[in-house]
Image (spheres, rainbow, N blue to C red):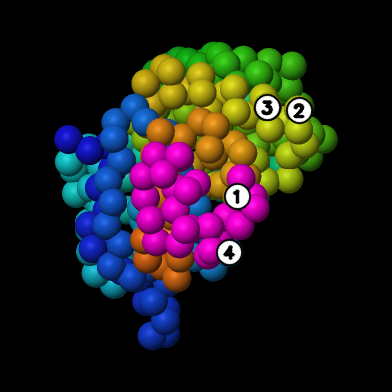
Amino acid sequence: MSALEVISLSKEFGGVHAIDGLSFSVTPGSIHSIIGPNGAGKTTLLNLITGIYQPTQGEVRLFDDSLVGKSVHARVMAGLGRTFQTPQVCMHMTAVENVMLGRHLHLDGRLLPAALRLPRIRDGEREARGRAAELMEYVGLADYLNDDPGAMPYGALKRLEVARALACEPKLLLLDEPAAGLGATEKADLTGLIEKLSDAGLTIVLVEHDMKLVMSISQHILVMNYGQMLAEGKPSEVRSNPDVVTAYLGSAV
């Protein structure tokens, strides 16, 4: 059984094929990277997997469960987590409250009990805060619990998004350009975090332009171009593929 299976997936915008008949599968527990030039369709693909976009045709399956017709929230509940290229954090909340947003998906959040502040809701909030604090420590943000996200370093915001995604208890985590805008030390910290998550058994799909990072941690790489698969394989195979070198890598690796 695959962790993620994309089957003949296509997406058109005004007659333009952003994704064109794409098929691939992701092995459970692996780090599976997706690379390609700007405009290749990588972020569109993530938006199709997460339900932000609906496909023109094709199917996405998560651990053999079809995601066709499911909402974004239903896909999160099925075990799909995601971060974004530009951190999507709530600036009017503290860092730990941002992580709690993910955890609240697993609480009894019905309107009436919440409005009445019933005991089980209060207990759930305490549990959510405690778990959020644990996750922030796990990603290296223990010193930022009550900080304003607007005052946090950019690299810390990236890890805050990872912590919030982990709070949803994903079985598969989609990382969209997590190294973008980071310095060398922050990239090293990020690489260590991704490897720690993988070692813990989490399946990771990584969209990333930093080829040194991709080549160093991936078990499998999919190369996209014009919404289609250009190549796929182990890092050594992709690195030496002449079509990939011509279309994308050049002297990057």
Tag 1's secondary structure? loop
Along the viewing direction, whichever of 93 and 24 lies nearer the viewer: 24
- Read off the magenta span: 230-253
Q: Measuring 53% from the left and 65% from the top, which residue is drawn there? A: 247
Which quarter of the figure has residue 130? top right
Q: Which residue is mark 3?
A: 188
Compute the Cα span from label 1 to label 3.
Answer: 15 Å
Residue type at mark 2: give it.
Thr
Look at the image and tell me whether residue 23 can be seen: yes
* Residue 115, position as x, y percentages in the image: 47, 34
Give the residue at mark 2.
185
State left or right for residue 181 relative to residue 47. Answer: right
- Residue positioned 33% across, 35% down in the render: 79
Q: Amino acid at mark 1?
A: His
Confirm whether the magenta stretch covers residue 231.
yes
**Label 4 to label 1, Cα distance in Å?**
9 Å
Indicate which disc, 1 or 3, sits on the residue closer to the N terminus. Answer: 3
The type of residue carrying mark 3 is: Ala
Residue at image mark 1: 209
Q: Secondary structure at mark 4?
A: loop
Estimate the x, y position of residue 29 in percent, counting from the top left. 34, 27
Q: Does residue 217 appear left or right of residue 230 in this picture?
A: right
Q: Is residue 69 visible?
A: no
**In whole angstroms, how far apart are the C-alphas of marks 3 and 2?**
5 Å
**In front here: 74 or 33?**
33
Between 68 and 223, the residue placed more toward the observer is 223
Quadrant assignment for the N terminus: top left
Please state which of residues 46 and 163 is positioned toward the viewer in this rendering: 46
Query: Mark 2 to mark 4: distance in Å?
Result: 25 Å
Tags 3 and 2 touching, CB below 8 Å: yes
